[in-house]
């Protein structure tokens, strides 16, 4: 056996070992707390970003206007009533899109402008426009 292994530990050696172990555990604890804080902040940032990021949806504007033109042509209205119906349709279209966008925190794009599949709200908007324009016929 070596002489150093046979030597008993004195108080200074034990104290130095205890201080080193205490410093190491403090560093480890601080590192773990820092990591936990970072993960918590990342989670909060993710949830916040998801909550405030608007949804992107599509609307078939051309198809809706074409459908209105077909249906209004079948009514055979005189020029004054046709203009009034068109004005009412335009107001209903604008109001319906604005109300839907505000209530759903969404960005509405026309179908040809979007290449990836997105939620289509055309049927919802058409139903709302029909409801809004019903009163004047």
Image: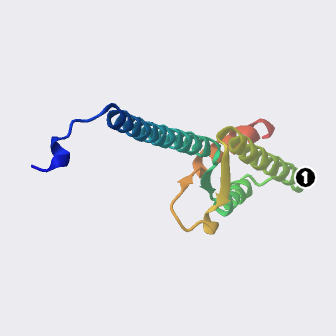
The front one of 30 and 34 is: 30
The front one of 100 and 26 is: 26
The front one of 120 and 6 is: 6
Q: Is residue 18 left or right of residue 43?
A: left
Q: Residues within 10 Å of mark 1 (few under 14, many from 20)?
A: few
Image: 18 above or below 98? above
Image: 111 above or below 51? below
Residue 119 percent location from the top left of the image:
54, 52
| Residue found at x 67% / y 52% | 107
Protein image colouring: rainbow
Q: How many marks?
A: 1
Q: Is residue 37 left or right of residue 94?
A: left
Residue 71 percent location from the top left of the image:
68, 54
Q: Is residue 106 left or right of residue 118?
A: right
| Residue found at x 66% / y 59% | 109
Residue 21: image quadrant is top left
Q: Is residue 4 left or right of residue 132?
A: left
The front one of 109 and 89 is: 109
Residue 61 percent location from the top left of the image:
68, 59
| Residue found at x 68% / y 38% | 103
Residue 98 percent location from the top left of the image:
75, 45
Which residue reaches farthest top?
A: 11
Q: Which residue is mark 1?
A: 80
Callout 1: SS: helix
From this viewpoint, is residue 67 visible? Answer: no
Which residue reaches farthest right?
A: 80
Residue 95: image quadrant is top right
């Amino acid at each position: 056996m070596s002489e150093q292994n046979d030597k008993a530990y004195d108080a200074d050696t034990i104290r130095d070992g205890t201080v080193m172990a205490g410093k190491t555990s403090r560093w480890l604890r601080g590192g773990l707390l820092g990591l936990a804080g970072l993960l918590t902040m990342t989670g909060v940032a993710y949830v916040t970003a998801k909550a405030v990021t608007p949804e992107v949806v599509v609307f078939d504007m051309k198809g809706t206007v074409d459908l209105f033109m077909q249906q209004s042509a079948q009514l055979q209205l005189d020029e004054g009533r046709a203009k009034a119906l068109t004005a009412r349709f335009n107001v209903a279209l604008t109001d319906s899109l604005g109300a839907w966008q505000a209530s759903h925190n969404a960005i509405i794009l026309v179908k040809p402008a979007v290449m990836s599949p997105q939620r289509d709200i055309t049927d919802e908007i058409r139903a709302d426009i029909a409801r809004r324009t019903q009163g004047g016929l």
